[in-house]
Structure formats: C-alpha cells, structure tokens
Amino acid sequence: MAELTKYLLDESEIPKQWYNIAADLPEPPKPPLHPATGEPVGPEDLAPLFPMALIQQEVATERWIEIPEPVREAYRLWRPTPLYRAHRLEAALQTPAHIYYKYEGVSPTGSHKPNTAIAQAYYNKLEGVQRLTTETGAGQWGSALSFSCNYFGLECKVYMVKVSYQQKPYRRVMMQTWGATVIPSPSDQTNAGRQILQQDPDSPGSLGIAISEAVEEAATHPEAKYSLGSVLNHVLLHQTVIGLEAELQMEMAGETPDVVIGCFGGGSNFAGLAFPFVRHKLQGRRQTRIVAVEPTACPTLTRGKYAYDFGDTVGMTPLMPMHTLGHTFVPGRIHAGGLRYHGAAPLVSLLVNQGVIEAEAYSQVECFEAGVLFARAEGIIPAPESTHAVKSAIVHALRCKESGKARGDPLQPFRSRALRHERLRRVLRRKAGGLDAERRGARAEPRGDLWFSAGELAVLGRGGFPFLLCRLRQERLRG
Ligand SMILES: Cc1ncc(COP(=O)(O)O)c(C=O)c1O
C-alpha cells in the first residue's frame, strides 16, 4: 500500500485537555512584575484586562487542564487538523528525511490562532464581558478573534499594525465581515497612539504599539477586556491541541520526530506544536531537537537579551522575563507581520535559556524562496510567517542528506525546477535590493517593492501550518 499523505483523526479524538508545560519545567518560571512596584503581579492587577478563568490558567501548575465542552464544540468546525507527509517536497529535495507538517490552515480564518481565540472569547462571555480589544500584526490574530467574538456574541475592536493594514487589505475585510471594528495603529484614538504619532507621524506601527493601544482601551472601559494572541502562558496552553493531535498522528504514521520546527513571533504556534514534544524531552525520554525560527529582521531569540521588559511599546503591561530586543524596537517592514514582535513568550524564553529549545533566524528573501519551493512541491501557498518554518525544515532536510550518502549540490534536487527557481531568486534579489541590508542588522528596513508574486504570497498565503516535523530515515542530524 502507498504511504499515506494525510493522517486524519476522528472528531472524537479532539483533545479533551490542554497540556500545561509549567508542570514539567525544571525550575518555576519567574513571575511577571508590576512596573510601578517591582513586585510580582497578583490576580487583582490583571483583573481589569482578563477574565479570572484566564488569570488562573496563567499561573496554573497542574499538567492537564480540561477543555470546556462549548470550546470543543467550536473546535469541531475545523479540528482535528490534518498532518501531512510532504512526499513531494521530500522528492524534490531528494532527502532521506521524512517531512511532516501539521496544517492549521483549515481553520475558518486560515491559521492556528482560533485555537486560543475561541477559548478566550468563551471565558470572557462566561464572565459577562461585552467587548474585546486586541492588536493584530499580519491580521491572522485579529481575524481569529473577530470570528470567535462573533461566534460567542461579543463585540470586537482590533488595532491593526499600520504597515499590515496597508499591505493586507483583505484581512481587514475578513475582520469586518465577522463584525469587528478595525483601526490602523498607531491611531489617534488612544493616548498611546497619539504619543507615538507625535514622535513619528510616519510610524509603520508594530505589535508593541498596537498592544499599548488595545490595552489602554480595555483598561479605561469597564465593559471591555483585552485579549492577546500570543506570548502569555494561557495562550500557549490553548495551542497545545496542535501538538497533542500531532503526537497521535505521528503514532499512526509509526514514527517519532527527531526535529520539531515552528516559526516564532510571540511563540504560540511554535509552543502549540512543540510543547507536547518538549514534555518527553524534559522527562528524559527523548532527545528531540526543538527549533524556533524567526526573521533576521526581528531576531528576538537569537540576538535579544534575556531580561525583564514590557510586553508593549509604551510600557503599560507588566514586566515579563523574556528574550527581548527592547520594547521600543520597531522592526523593519517585512511581510511576515506576525513575526514583528520585540519580545517572546516567557515560557519559550526560559527553555531557550536552558538549552532545551534552539533558535534560528532567516532573511525574508530566503524564506520567500523556500515558500515558493514548498508551494510548487506541495501545492499549498504558505503565509510569510510560515515560510520561516518551511525554510528551516528544508535546511535540516538537506543537512540530513549531506550527512548521508547523497552528497552534492543542495540545489541539484530541484534541477527540473531549477531554472524557474533561479529566475525567481535573481528577480527577488534585484527587486528587493534593500533586503541585503536586512542581513547586516535587525534594524535595516527592506524596501516595500518586492516582486509581485512574493507580494501575493504575502497577501494570499495560508497561515497556520507553521509546523514541520522531520524524521530522518537513516541518518541523525549533525550540528
Ligand atoms: C500565520 C502566522 N504564523 C505565526 C504567527 C506568529 O505568532 P505566534 O508566534 O504566536 O504563532 C502569526 C502571527 O500573527 C501568524 O499570523
């Protein structure tokens, strides 16, 4: 029998519990600190922003947390998601590696983000909240929260990073279709936005700035609360449905992953896939390599400092222990808007610091090249964020090949496609001259005139299969 391409689970196999990695950490995470007192924040400090159920999840230490039935009911709209074996990519690369990807793009909004948006909207609804405010970078998180607020009958207001608002108008239309109000950030609707605009009227915006605006609005309106699409412990917790399903699917495939890879913005899709696999590593049962992949334009894990910093630009959130480029850092205008965040999830930062998780960074051009290659092999056009995971998976798969018998030119496998690929490479390099500067330092900004098909990749690409699992048939990875 031919090997399967899709590993599918039944609806009854949607996880009944989320996995909480706090139970398995070698040391307890450091607490967030109150910016005024420097003391650990308590539930009452967070209550203006979040419902109590989510505050409790933020500090929970039990390993498994029940998924409420109405949340599982909503998950049934798109979960379980398929695990694909990337047969055609493997063939194109002529690699002995087995490459799998967990495809979250089948969700109503096209990414992993509804896994937590639905849960957050549910808990807010239960506690009588009428309206949620949030930020969005690429528009994926804003779409997910708009969809989820509509599902549970809440109003939704989204501050969308201005450069993404301009680059991705279709995302704005999606949010409006689900009934949300969408404001380009920085805006003149909040003190935070006005302050930024005064300093830089042409500010492209950033996730940090948009968070300041959304937090301010929630904190000053009693009927509203704030919802964050990444970074926080409870968000990563909700996303673990991805990895828990993937574990079952890898069992179906009769394989165990050697490398688990996810793109990294604030850390939610990465942790969602990786944490269930990290648990076996922490419990000493497996030696899996766990790799978070970020843009060189915003190299938080690879070049940031591990320190207490604000989650937003203006300095309204608690101080969190995390890898950070500094809360005033505004990344270049790369298309992967969801990866333009100065900070990182404290849980992921801790594990990077302890050497349990590795981090890699790639430039926009290399990621788009990998994304085009993936689209031509597998058919699915990835979101710019997801292309970072694709790039890393290709690098690891080719390295695996080099460590085996099939040495040689890493582009050799693409010979049949090589001309088109090389042409694309040349056009991207020429048209995106500014991108060379990006390689020299995080602050350099690429120009916005990418070749049109790369631009389309940014507009049309499906998000939410940011996850690739590699298994190596004969060789273990080196280096
Ligand atoms: C498709 C996609 N992938 C990844 C991310 C990065 O966020 P996170 O690191 O929380 O998964 C985003 C954020 O908007 C996104 O839209």
Image: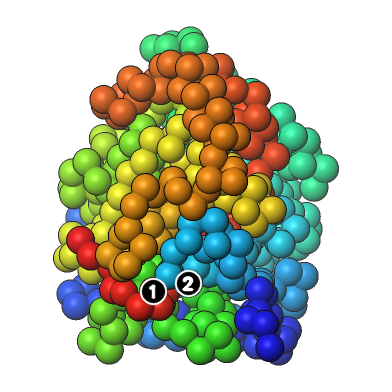
Residue denoted by label 1: 472
Check the image and report above or below for 93 versus 405: above
Q: Quadrant of residue 299?
A: top left
State the image coordinates of residue 238 (x, y, percent, origin top left).
52, 69
Amino acid type shown at disc 1: Leu
Residue 342 place in picture, x, y as percent? 34, 39
Report which residue position mark 2 lands on.
Answer: 98
Q: For the point 67% across and 82% down, which residue is it?
A: 2
Quarter of the image with the C terminus in it:
bottom left
The relative height of residue 38 versus residue 62 in the rendered view (above or below) is: above
Please tell me how crowded label 2 is: few (under 14), some (14-19), or many (20+) other residues with Cα within 10 Å.
some
Amino acid at the residue labelled 2: His
Residue 383 shows in this picture: no
User: Which comes before the other along the chain, label 2 or label 1?
Assistant: 2
> Rounded to the nearest whole Å, what is the CA distance between mark 2 and mark 1?
6 Å
Whether residues under marks 2 and 1 lie with C-beta atoms below 8 angstroms apart, the answer is: yes
Disc 1 residue lies near ligand 1 with CB under 8 A: no
Q: Nearer the viewer, residue 395 or 316?
A: 395
Left or right placement of residue 93 versus residue 398 in this view: right
Specify the color scheme.
Answer: rainbow
Q: Is residue 261 above or below residue 19?
A: above
Q: Position of residue 230 (x, y in %)?
A: 47, 54
- Mark 1 is surrounded, within 10 Å at the Cα level, by few (under 14), some (14 to 19) or many (20 or more) other residues, namely many
